[in-house]
Image (tube, coloured by chain):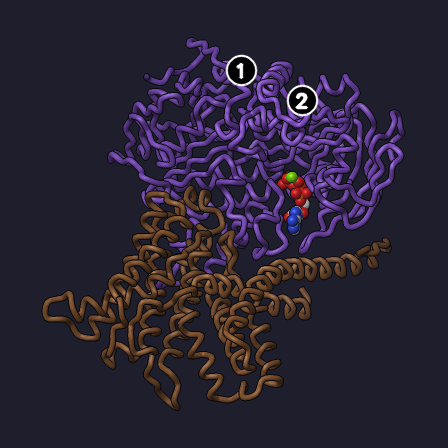
Chain colours: A purple, B brown
Amino acid sequence: MWEKKGKIVLGLYGISKVYPGTVALHDVNLEIEKGVVHGIIGKNGAGKTTLVGIIAGIISPTKGEIVIEDRHYTHLSCIKARQENISIVPQEPQLMLDLSVAENLFIPNYHLASKGRRIHWDEMYIKAENILKQAGLGLNSRAQAGELSISDRQLVLVVKACYVEQARIIILDEVSASLTQKDEKLLYRIIEERKREGKTILFISHRTDELLEICDRVTVLRDGRSVTTVSCDTLNMEKLSSLIVGEEFRFQRICNEIAACDQREKETVLEVQNLTKLGAFQNISFTLKDKEVLGIAGLRGSGRTEIFRSIMGIEPLDEGLIKLKGKKVRFASPADALKKGLAFLPEDRESEGIISSLSVRENLVLSALKKITRIFCIHKQTEKDMITHLIHSLDIKISSAEQEVSQLSGGNKQKVVVGRIVANQPRVYILDEPTRGIDIAAKESVLKIIREQLSQTGGIILTSPGLEDLLLVCDRILVLYRGRLVAEMRRENFSETTLFNAVQGGTEPNQVAGVASN
Amino acid sequence: MSKKTRVQMFLLDNLIWLIVIGFFLLNAIITPHFATYNNIVNIFYHSSIMSMLILGQGLILIIGRLDLSIESTLAFAPGVAMLLVTQWLPGGAGPVSAIILTLAVGALVGLFNGYCIGKIGVNPFLQTLSMLIMLRGLVLFLVPFSIFPLHDVYTYAGKARIFGNIPVAIPITIAIFIIFHFVIQYTPFGRFFMATGGNPKASFISGINTTRIVMYAFMLSGLLAAVAGLLYAGRQGSVNNSMGDGMVLLAFAGAILGGASLEGGKGTPMGMLGGGILLGMISNSLNLLGVGVTLVYATKGALIFVAIVLDRIKVKLRNHLMQKEQLEKILHQSKGDGESFSPSS
Ligand SMILES: Nc1ncnc2c1ncn2[C@@H]1O[C@H](COP(=O)(O)OP(=O)(O)OP(=O)(O)O)[C@@H](O)[C@H]1O
Ligand SMILES: [Mg+2]
């Protein structure tokens, strides 16, 4: 154990959690000091969410003891955790989508904004407005939560835990995974501020750089056991990565060697002209060549997701032309698009990606059933071969292929959705943040699959939460700002700073290779 | 997984059939004349109509909707078909056309429901409720008295008996269930059904034509209701306007007993057959025991309740089993490691 400096606010001793089919945690000990930012990291399915779930009273441990200050518990309930002033922002943002932002902030603590037994609506909106302003979030408190982007939803929950509930111990489970760079800064500021006020923060993330930057201590989990808890001063990225993976970890700069090949020779698979959806994006024109990896970089609300959804026929377009291999098309639904060779990976895996009542096997092959069907019947052996291959190459952690997807950890769910697209092998892959919530090792392998396997069979359009991933795998990057394409860069003149500036809206035309025609 | 656990899991998955067998054995002892060849055939015969409705309802529950209108379709389809061949069509038509017309009318009613729900987006409860009332009203209007006699070919499925006095309805029912079981379990079409029920939005985005699946499901449930109507009319030898009255709620019960869930994405046709046979056995045994008709109804109501509770217990039991299995494995490992791990609870 490490030498003790501060006062321990929270101690977990000998915690185990056994799920049907898996041991999520095995004899974990953890002590958290008051007023620190404590990071938790580990591969997908290592047990991070389970651990913090136990602290927040959502999950009850099979065995072990929880000590908060000097009160001992065998398990906490949600209510007990609230009384102990523990708040959690869960991995999958869960807002009441039909309610306003303000109401989401105050539910179920309406008493904070009411007089007597009556809810004082106006006051609630004003209070919410103030809180949002204090947090530096430019949102309308009357807006419906369902209209917000994923990034905003996540921030609303953070604000709720940090400012409304005024928790002593704040748990943030992979919140930064769905934030864009600008929002990340906001999050770090909020965390810093809370820390200064003496609150304790538990921070889960898959990004080693981020963790090292904002945390004081880090606990590494591996296969449900706590490997070690170390102070961040003594760590660097390589060391931390090795601890997570359990062996010497080298960043294989997979794609640095990619020759910036000339795209002009290749056949164009997808071409869009002047796509417009009022209020979301205007005059979007680009082409996608065969075997090309095209990145779209942009801030939240810049319209990436909306463009994808409109191309796929999920939401209608106001105007514009889509050409597939030179032929004019307009897809009525994703089913229509899939038939013609476009597959789409949605951003929100929980509600739009996985089908949680089905098994991992059924989810993986769902879009590729045609390939494994022989005379009306699904061929069992072919199906088995297909999923064994996918599970292996994506390193999906499951107890068996028959396990329900709802029981997987967040990152493994994401891998299942990615696997589904990979299995289908369409001509055009439209991937909205495929690496969201995936651990460092698996991220490399997903990017590698994108670069080496997928790009052999078709063209790829890709977005990513961070710019590094795009710089790593793309042949070309388009920059989207407030619904317009503002810049285009080719691999030979990629530069992180230029890209970063362009994404923020500060385009410097002389540094950018070519501005997309409007 | 150990052999014991695997057997236990298998039994849990087929819980409804365990109950069917258990209930049968119990009655074989306490109910006079229950376990006789004739009575058993009788039970199957009497379950066949309800089983068709249960299967139709089950398919709809699998895609996460519900269909209240099947009991009215059961009367409407043969009613309209008979009126067509006897009165409305100039020159009339033969009994085979009558059978085809019956099935077609059922399928069309279902398709209309499916169109309104899948394409236009009407709430399934309201849509099928309105059809339930409207079709029953139409039947009462069109068929003031019963229509009979029916042609022998038309009543063949419901009335005729083949080898050793077995009603044709029984092999027909079993064949239909086998076909549906196969389709749901082993074809892409079946997978699409399960996926659409599990998460319609994700299924839509993953490239399943969910609208079409919804329309197919309702069409099939209409078709199955028409088959049920054909069997019903055949058994009675006539078409009357109160056929099927009050059967839809029991069809829900049967489907849920058979493993379907109101949330969608769950259930298998074979399980639903078990549900149908169980309902049939219950009314049969209560009849033999001389319990009054009204009480039989109440018992079936109680059964719906049992079905729901059973469903929860099943999930709990399964989790418990797997957890036990896992704990044993850890214990085994820890012994090897020299650590101690004592499972509490
Ligand atoms: N309800 C459940 N039933 C069965 N197994 C479960 C359940 N919930 C989680 N698990 C399993 O417990 C393990 C730990 O899951 P957990 O969600 O804590 O992982 P995690 O570290 O948060 O991973 P990620 O980085 O992917 O979010 C996983 O192997 C998962 O499959
Ligand atoms: Mg997690």
Instruction: Report x, y in % for residue A491.
Output: 45, 24
- Residue A169 location, quadrant: top right
The residue tagged 1 is: A497
Furthest residue toward bottom: B164
Q: Which mark is residue A115?
A: 2
- Which image quarter is the C terminus of chain B in? bottom right
Q: Chain of mark 1?
A: A
| In front of the other: A132 or A12 | A132
Is residue A331 visible to us here?
A: yes
Q: Circle 2 — which element?
A: strand
- Residue A246 location, quadrant: top right
- Which image quarter is the N terminus of chain B in? bottom right
Query: Tag 1: residue type?
Result: Thr
Q: Residues within 10 Å of mark 1 (few under 14, many from 20)?
A: few
Residue at 84%, 42% in the rendered image: A73
Residue at 80%, 31% in the rendered image: A230
Instruction: Report x, y in % for residue A47.
Output: 70, 43
Instruction: Report x, y in % for residue B203.
Output: 44, 46
Residue A77 left/right relative to A294: right
Q: Is mark 1 within 8 Å of ligand 1?
A: no
Query: Tag 2: residue type?
Result: Lys
Residue at 71%, 47% in the rendered image: A24
